[in-house]
Image (cartoon, rainbow, N blue to C red):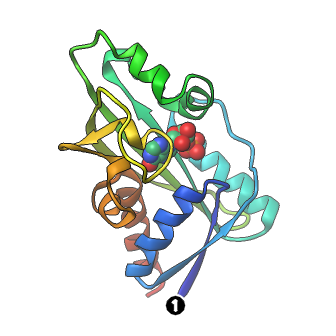
Amino acid sequence: MKTIHFVTSNMGKAKEAKALCKEFDIKIQQIRYEYPELQSDDLETIAKYGAECASRALNKTVIVEDAGLFIPALRGFPGPYSAYVFKTIGNKGILGLMSDKKNREAYFKSAVGYCEPGEDSITFTGVANGRIAREIRGEHGFGYDPIFLYDDRTFGELSTEEKNKVSHRCKALKKFVKWISAKDI
Ligand code: IMP
């Protein structure tokens, strides 16, 4: 079984990646290391830079992942600022900003960056479309999961396995897994 080092301090992300990659015979080993996060509007640029910094600092082949929630009615907010916005106003704050909005569409985007020491990184992306719920629902997942409606349930109401069938992260990771599996042949 191949081992991939996933540099993240987010236990929720690591749990999802472990469950997904196990299906493809890849073991995910989490490394908790805080790599510098580039200020950019583009998740792929952030993941690319993060993967290169982490790979150089740890002298290992790594993946990192950057994700964000994008809400068209708020002109894409919180987008690349999702982590800061979650820490400051949180899910209640987003529901407050959305209280008078008719258009409740939203999407999550994930960018996975892969980097070997001394090389340029490669990125893989995935998107999950949904809507912003009217209230916080569900005990599973993390971050914005309890306010992100996929069909009639929030991501917070889905098990890891259920979320892994449709999420932005699983789509990006599946592209990566397909690519890395072919690379080894
Ligand atoms: P980052 O990718 O760690 O920078 O995450 C940005 C923000 O989006 C954090 O507040 C995360 O909790 C949140 N986030 C990232 N991925 C997800 C997800 O799959 N579900 C819910 N929130 C997420």
Quadrant of residue 114 in the image?
bottom right
Q: Which residue is located at x 69 percent, y 40 percent? A: 37
Q: Position of residue 107 (x, y in %)?
A: 33, 36
The vertical placement of 168 against 173, above or below, is above
For the residue pair 137 and 76, the one nearer the viewer reads as 137
Q: Nearer the viewer, residue 175 or 88?
A: 88
Badge 1, how many Cα within 10 Å: few under 14, some, many 20+?
A: few
Labels in figure, total: 1
Residue 129 location (% of width, % of height): 26, 40
Name the residue rendered at 29%, 9% in the picture. 100
**For residue 116, above or below residue 65:** below
Q: Residue at label 1?
A: 1
Amino acid type shown at disc 1:
Met
**Can residue 117 be seen at all in this image of the molecule?**
yes
The residue located at (44%, 22%) in the rendering is 94
Displayed quadrant of residue 21: bottom left
Q: Which of 136 and 4 lies nearest the eye of the viewer?
A: 136
Q: Residue at x 34, y 38 (%)?
A: 148
Judged from this view, the residue extending furthest toward the left is 151
Specify whether 61 is left or right of 139.
Answer: right
Q: Quadrant of residue 45?
A: top right
**Where residue 101 appears, x then y in whole percent?**
27, 13
Kind of element beneath mark 1: loop
Q: Is residue 45 visible?
A: no
Measured as percent of width and height from the top left, residue 3 is found at 58, 81
Quarter placement of the C terminus: bottom left
